[in-house]
Image (cartoon, rainbow, N blue to C red):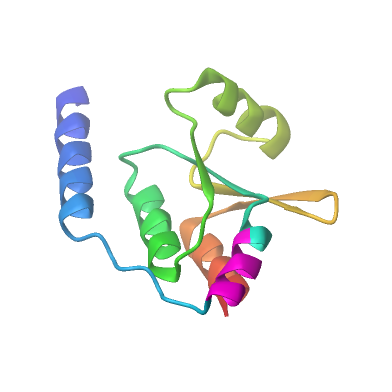
Amino acid sequence: MKLVRWLLGSLILFFDFIFTPRSKKRPEGEQAMLDQTTSHFKLYQFKACPFCVKVRRAIKRQGLKVDTRDAKNNHGYRQELLEQGGKIKVPCLRIEENGQVNWLYESNDIIAYLDKVAA
């Protein structure tokens, strides 16, 4: 089973690399404001998780700058996700706005939220 996961994960990463989407182009000022908004976003993810790849592709397509945190290989990030987010489930977007922190799970919900932010 571990071999199958490794093989599928490698294929997912290979095709993600080959078919990387292009970033949306915006005027410099608009992009700077968007970068400032997303500077407080953190995406907890596993590198080869298909749902995480889906979210990372949406981030790339929208031209957003979101810090990614590998919760599989980094024990500190994994612990943050468990203690602050409540569960180890990826993808998870940590959103810090006005001193308040929200944790958003589910790839489709994360993508919908990011689309609203980028609109």
Q: Position of residue 6 (x, y in %)?
A: 19, 30
Q: Front-most of 102 and 88? A: 102
The residue positioned 50% from the left and 65% from the top of the image is 111
Asked if residue 55 lies left or right of residue 14, the reply is right
In the image, residue 18 above or below residue 86: below
Task: State yes or no: residue 109 in magenta.
Answer: no
Stretch in magenta: 28-35
Q: Main secondary structure of the magenta part?
A: helix
Q: Position of residue 17 (x, y in %)?
A: 21, 51
Asked if residue 65 lies left or right of residue 12, the reply is right
Q: Front-most of 92 and 100? A: 100
Q: Position of residue 77 (x, y in %)?
A: 57, 28
In the image, residue 100 above or below residue 84: below
Q: Quadrant of the C terminus?
A: bottom right
Residue 109 lies in quadrant: bottom right
Asked if residue 100 lies left or right of residue 77, the reply is right
Q: Position of residue 98 (x, y in %)?
A: 84, 56
Q: Quadrant of the N terminus?
A: top left
